[in-house]
Image (spheres, rainbow, N blue to C red):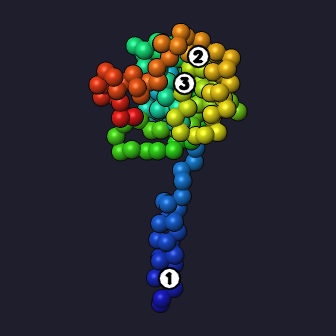
Amino acid sequence: MNAPILVGACGAAALLFASSLPAAEPTCRVIRVQDGDSLTCLSAAKQRIEIRLADLDAPEIAQPYGQLAQLQLFRLVYNKSVRLEVVEQTRYGPKVARVYLDDLYVNGEMVRQGAAWVDGDPHLTPLETEARSLQRGLWGLPQAEIVPPWQWRSERGDRLSRR
């Protein structure tokens, strides 16, 4: 007589445990690149997913090198299937994610190409150091034009400065 209750309790515990497990890494097709660190994908279920690339900060579109950073990300991922490793999910706004194109870590590649500053993961710092030393991407600009995006936003009182 107590057996059905035990089975029911075990089933409920299993459901509770399963819901706390991390979701499988989603894949999606990139349908828009807003700037050098933001994109939109379409899931297999045809849902739009707004993504901000984790651990980096690219120049804003109106900033020196901003449009080129957007173009670099566009060339890497537009209309391609990418895998997302979501590191932060807010209720509203974009998901913050590490983005992979097959075996290529897109976030790291943007830093390696000199299209973004490292803003988080210290493992990316050597890629930024290399880009700086080779004057790759934005690091080839005149020194006066190399302004970190967080500073650029702050100087303009931009609402995005709280990134």
Which disc number belongs to residue 116? 3
Give how far apart the Cα atoms at labels 2 and 3 are.
Answer: 10 Å
Q: Give the amino acid at mark 2.
A: Trp
Q: Secondary structure at mark 1?
A: helix
Residue identifier under label 2:
139
Q: Is residue 5 visible?
A: yes
Q: Give the amino acid at mark 1.
A: Leu
Residue 103 at x, y percent in the picture: 70, 33
Q: Secondary structure at mark 3?
A: loop
Q: Are marks 1 and 3 in contact (CB under 8 Å)?
A: no
Q: Nearer the viewer, residue 39 or 116?
A: 116
Q: Are marks 2 and 3 in contact (CB under 8 Å)?
A: no
Q: Nearer the viewer, residue 62 or 148?
A: 148
Q: Are marks 2 and 1 in contact (CB under 8 Å)?
A: no
Residue identifier under label 1:
6
Q: Nearer the viewer, residue 102 or 140?
A: 140
How many other residues sit within 10 Å of disc 2, few (<14), some (14-19) or many (≥20)? many
Q: Residue at x 59, y 30 (%)?
A: 107
How many other residues sit within 10 Å of disc 3, few (<14), some (14-19) or many (≥20)? many
Q: Residue at x 51, y 44 (%)?
A: 87
Q: Give the amino acid at mark 3.
A: Ala
Residue 135 at x, y percent in the picture: 64, 15
Q: Secondary structure at mark 2?
A: helix
Q: Please, is residue 69 above or below residue 3 in the view? A: above
Q: Residue at x 52, y 42 (%)?
A: 86
Is 3 left, or right, of 123 in this rendering?
A: left
Residue 106 at x, y percent in the picture: 61, 29
Give how far apart the Cα atoms at labels 2 and 1 are.
Answer: 64 Å
Looking at marks 2 and 1 on the same chain, the residue that comes earlier in the sequence is marked by: 1
Residue 17 at x, y percent in the picture: 51, 66
Give how far apart the Cα atoms at labels 1 and 3 are.
Answer: 55 Å
Q: Please, is residue 69 above or below residue 82 in the view? A: above
